[in-house]
Amino acid sequence: MSRPKLLLATNNAGKARELVVLLDGVPFIVTTPQEEGIVLDVEETGTIFEENAALKSRAFASVSGLLSLADDSGLEVDALGGEPGVMSARYAGPEASDEDRVRHLLSKLEGIEWNSRGARFRSVIAISGPAGTVELFEGVCEGVIALSPKGAGGFGYDPVFYVSSLGKLMAELTMEEKNSISHRGSAARKAVEYLKT
């Protein structure tokens, strides 16, 4: 019997690569919109990660007829009242690069002392079936926003997210180290347990 497919409800190649590794061991063939010939851009109108993850997983499940998994995640900085939050990808404008977003974030934190630069990455994974059901799984990773970017790994805000427990920036971690402590890794482990049942 061939395994059913699980569609990753994302057009972000970096996120898809990370999710494929994190979902290793699920009883599904993990596929992407590109592989399935699906062109869909879901407007993220939610005000919290749970809403956006559910919006994306439901939309892709509805269009594809496949069980679909979406992740909505972002950075919450204490000194900025939880910003950028759900706006993490669009924080420096819709066309901004990762470097632009990091620069924008650092400019907003100029003059703020190290011990006031606490932050966390939060991830919510939503899994939807074509009938519209949604299951949610959350993961959080605590850290500090560094004074300047460093490291060549990861994507997004990884070059300025200092993981105190490892004494390194997220962008300096190996994929294995990152997946063991990351917000997405934590949410994905819960999702994998659910998918196995």
Image (cartoon, rainbow, N blue to C red):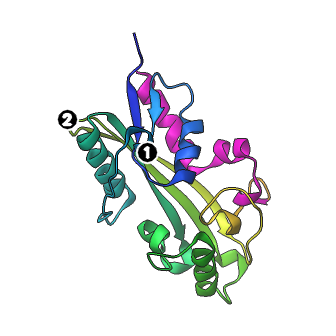
Q: Position of residue 85 (x, y in %)?
A: 46, 68
The residues tagged by marks 1 and 2 sit, at their Cα atoms, a distance apart of 23 Å
**Up/down of 65 relative to 99, above or below:** above
Whether label 1 touches label 2, CB < 8 Å: no
Residue appearing at x 61%, y 59% in the figure? 142
Q: Say which quarter of the image contains residue 160.
A: bottom right
Whichever of labels 1 and 2 marks the residue nearer the N terminus, that label is: 1
Total of numbered circles in the picture?
A: 2
**Up/down of 52 relative to 126, above or below:** below
Question: In this view, which residue lies farthest toward the right?
Answer: 167
Q: Quadrant of the N terminus?
A: top left
**Up/down of 114 relative to 111, above or below:** above
- Queried whether the magenta region covers residue 93, the answer comes back as no
- Queried whether the magenta region covers residue 169, the answer comes back as yes
Mark 1 residue type = Gln
Question: In this image, 59 relative to 26: left or right?
Answer: left
Q: Position of residue 174 (x, y in %)?
A: 75, 47
Question: In this view, which residue lies farthest toward the bottom?
Answer: 111
Question: In this image, 82 relative to 53: left or right?
Answer: right
Mark 2 residue type = Ala
Label 1 secondary element: helix
Residue under label 1, please give it: 34
The numbered dot on residue 131 is 2
- Start-end of magenta stretch: 168-197
Q: Residues within 10 Å of mark 2 (few under 14, many from 20)?
A: few
Label 2 secondary element: loop
Q: Position of residue 110 (x, y in %)?
A: 66, 88
Q: Nearer the viewer, mark 1 or mark 2?
A: 1
Q: Position of residue 101 (x, y in %)?
A: 57, 75
Residue appearing at x 51%, y 40% in the figure? 188
